[in-house]
């Protein structure tokens, strides 16, 4: 029996993971597509005049089986994948893209949507108007106005594009898993804290090796780069990390990038946009590439003098300490940490004992209760896809069921790097019933060892608060339609709740809820909190410039038009060459590395390392959906700093302010334009002053 064909007979209707077998996915996707097709056909052939309910509403309700199987599959393909899952992803992705295109290019359906969109909307709610516009634009932006030949071309581009994105991500994962630094001499671990050594020994043991293993996973890589006194080994690790997808092997991503960027440009041109970035930004708070470049340049201008000063300070420090004449990229983490420690006498290892994972989780729950009145109740009878996962029922202030919350904290071979929030089930209204969401956060935190519980770095603590902020957006959703619910908002608005939550990690009143020594139970000392605050702005200039750089790499790649030109740019025109491809295409012919270097002009203070680059493992923009969107982290920082100021004015746990944020932002999801929602919360537009002030860049 295929569980995707049944109503889930489980607690809260959660996904019955243990009943799902690898062989269930493809038949469920196939049948799901057939069902969705039949539903669309039925609404298109409906002889009644098109209305919001019989068209937009019916479309919103269609494809139930498909939603079920894809929300299970793609979440697991990120959190618990293997070769078989990846093969299935390669198999079903083209099917899904083809299906999506078929709906998007259904002329009969588009005619109905267009008629409603251009007709009288006065009887529609605001939410319905937003959904209608989104639906109409969805069609237009997917080629509904194209002729038949161009529609076919678009279809071919999208299929190829989806395959390439998957390949990109798989190459990065393969490269990560292929590398490990095996150390057998304890002297090679000089400088590493005991916990890190222990973890490295544990990893070696798991692979039945003597000694220690250092890998490219963040919890292994970052501490090594921060603490190892062995400059030669740091260099080796840096090169391995930075050369992912840029080596002379079958996992190389340079051609993938060239083809992907060309396909995106070609697609945008077909739809009448100057570039992929123009296309993407049409549906963003930051409407156009020029606004984004202005935004980035403005921040760059403010941060650059600070960054230069910081780099000089760091160089002088390394010179004084170890006689280093030229600071290299693999020195940055190491000397920064040392200098930070000297200035603030604080480091990750000093703080870790106060951040035991279980206490931090309990702390974020307490903070959520103080702010929004919600409570978390651990459940042990919800079906899991992996034994590490923990589940909770979330209740509102009246004790009413609000959501199911999954937390998956530790790294595994089949888990993608980084941390993210996702949903197994979206919130929406089904007639009179409010279907509550099933939300998950997936992280790669420091694992417990044989002698120590999971003790987080402060960065991991803020990551947890960050993902929890996204989760709140999902759990507190109060919409009618899944497409506008929770985190279904414009991309440059989606990081507001997550980045806002990070602010509480720096406040004594919040830290006192959970930051207690895991052995003695004593509160984190006040002087540490003061130092955390001060040190959070340490190297803020360089950090800002790094973010601006990533934003520019992204905007650079995606501002290229289909002729290989960047409109309004001083960058020389790029040449293009026709290639043999499933899609007839001029592939932009350029050195990926040279292009990236050009985007970073004036932003990189370190000597170039020729065997490394960012683009070939920049999964955000080439695998995930952040293309032309990386700037949105900074954009959201402007929003979050400005929003947090509202809490600082009234008190960080002020219920009224929290209530306003909940009602106007978290529960509202994408039901209205973000600038309208934000103004309703703050009483005015966001200003960048709070961010610059917070970062010490004024
Ligand atoms: Zn985020």
Image (cartoon, rainbow, N blue to C red):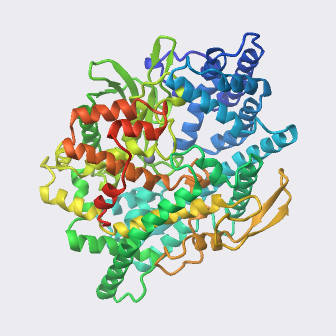
- Tell me the quarter of the image containing the N terminus: top right
The one of 440 and 427 positioned closer to us in this rendering:
427
Residue 217, position in %: x, y?
47, 57
Residue 186 visible in the picture: no
Image quarter in which the C terminus is found: bottom left
Question: Which residue is at a point 23% across and 57% down the rendered structure image?
Answer: 351
* Residue 337 horizontal side relative to residue 177, left or right: left
- Residue 382: image quadrant is top left
Left/right of residue 284 with respect to residue 434 in the rendered view: right
Task: Note whether 4 is above or below 571 in the view shown.
Answer: above
How many marks can you see?
0
135 or 221, which lies in front? Answer: 135
Question: Hey, which quadrant is residue 596 in on the image?
Answer: bottom right
Q: Is residue 431 above or below residue 108?
A: above
Question: Which percent across, then down, holds residue 482?
Answer: 53, 26
Residue lying at 65% horizontally and 35% vertically, measured from the top left: 137
Whether residue 93 can be seen here: yes
Counting from the top left corner in percent of width and height, residue 94 is at 74, 39
Residue 124's place in the image compared with 374, above or below, is above
Residue drawn at 29 percent across, 58 percent down: 694
Task: Report x, y in % for residue 41.
Answer: 76, 18
The answer to whether 434 appears left or right of 89 in the picture is left
- The answer to whether residue 641 is left or right of residue 433 is left
Q: What is the quadrant of residue 594 in the picture?
A: bottom right
Residue at 65%, 66% (x, y): give it. Answer: 568
1 or 166, which is in the foreground? 166
């Amino acid at each position: 029996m295929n569980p995707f064909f049944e109503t889930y007979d489980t607690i809260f209707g959660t996904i019955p993971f243990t009943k799902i077998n690898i062989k269930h996915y493809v038949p469920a996707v196939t049948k799901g597509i057939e069902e969705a097709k039949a539903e669309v056909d039925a609404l298109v052939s409906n002889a009644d005049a098109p209305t919001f309910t019989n068209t937009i509403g019916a479309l919103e309700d269609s494809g139930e089986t498909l939603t079920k199987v894809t929300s299970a599959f793609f979440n697991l393909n990120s959190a618990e994948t293997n070769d078989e899952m990846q093969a299935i992803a390669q198999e079903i992705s083209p099917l899904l893209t083809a299906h999506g295109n078929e709906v998007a290019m259904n002329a009969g359906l588009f005619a109905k949507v267009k008629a409603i969109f251009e007709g009288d909307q006065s009887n529609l709610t605001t939410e319905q108007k937003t959904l209608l516009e989104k639906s109409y634009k969805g069609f237009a932006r997917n080629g509904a106005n194209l002729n038949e030949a161009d529609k076919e071309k678009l279809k071919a581009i999208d299929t190829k594009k989806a395959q390439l994105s998957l390949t990109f991500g798989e190459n990065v994962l393969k490269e990560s898993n292929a590398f490990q630094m095996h150390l057998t001499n304890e002297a090679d671990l000089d400088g590493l804290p005991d916990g890190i050594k222990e973890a490295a020994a544990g990893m070696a043991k798991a692979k039945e090796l003597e000694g220690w293993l250092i890998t490219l996973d963040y919890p292994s890589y970052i501490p090594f780069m921060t603490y190892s006194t062995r400059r030669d080994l740091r260099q080796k690790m840096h090169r391995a990390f930075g050369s992912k997808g840029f080596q002379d092997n079958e996992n190389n991503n340079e051609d993938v990038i060239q083809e992907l960027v060309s396909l995106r440009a070609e697609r945008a041109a077909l739809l009448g946009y100057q570039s992929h970035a123009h296309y993407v930004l049409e549906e963003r708070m930051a409407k156009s590439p020029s606004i984004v470049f202005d935004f980035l340049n403005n921040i760059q201008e403010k941060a650059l003098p600070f960054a230069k000063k910081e780099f000089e300070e760091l160089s002088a420090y390394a010179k004084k300490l170890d006689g280093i004449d030229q600071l290299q990229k693999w020195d940055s983490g190491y000397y920064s940490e040392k200098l930070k420690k000297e200035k603030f006498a604080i480091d990750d290892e000093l703080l870790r004992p106060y951040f035991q994972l279980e206490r931090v989780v309990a702390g974020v729950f307490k903070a959520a209760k103080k702010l929004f009145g919600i409570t978390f109740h651990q459940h042990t009878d919800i079906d899991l896809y992996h034994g590490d996962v923990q589940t909770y029922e979330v209740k509102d202030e009246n004790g009413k069921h609000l959501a199911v919350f999954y937390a998956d904290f530790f790294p595994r071979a089949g888990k993608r790097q980084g941390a993210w929030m996702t949903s197994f089930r979206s919130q929406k209204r089904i007639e009179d019933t409010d279907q509550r969401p099933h939300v998950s956060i997936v992280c790669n935190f420091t694992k417990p060892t044989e002698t120590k519980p999971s003790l987080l770095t402060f960065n991991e603590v803020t990551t947890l608060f960050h993902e929890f902020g996204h989760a709140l957006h999902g759990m507190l959703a109060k919409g009618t339609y899944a497409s506008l619910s929770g985190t279904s908002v414009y991309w440059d608005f989606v990081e507001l709740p997550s980045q806002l939550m990070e602010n509480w990690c720096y406040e004594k009143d919040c830290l006192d809820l959970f930051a207690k020594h895991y052995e003695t139970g004593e509160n984190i000392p006040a002087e540490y909190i003061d130092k955390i605050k001060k040190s959070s702005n340490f190297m803020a200039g360089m950090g800002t410039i790094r973010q601006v750089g990533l934003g520019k790499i992204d905007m650079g790649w995606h501002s290229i038009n289909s002729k290989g030109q960047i409109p309004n740019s001083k960058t020389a025109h790029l040449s293009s060459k026709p290639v043999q491809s499933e899609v007839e295409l001029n592939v932009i012919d350029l050195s990926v590395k040279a292009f990236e270097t050009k985007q970073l002009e004036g932003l990189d203070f370190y000597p170039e390392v020729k065997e490394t680059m960012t683009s070939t493992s920049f999964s955000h923009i080439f695998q995930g959906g952040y293309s032309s969107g990386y700037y949105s982290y900074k954009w959201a920082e402007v929003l979050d700093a400005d929003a947090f100021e509202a809490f600082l004015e009234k008190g960080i746990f002020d219920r009224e302010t929290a209530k306003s944020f909940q009602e106007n932002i978290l529960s509202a999801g994408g039901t209205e334009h973000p600038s309208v929602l934000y103004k309703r919360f703050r009483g005015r537009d966001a200003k960048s002053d709070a961010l610059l002030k917070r970062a010490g860049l004024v």
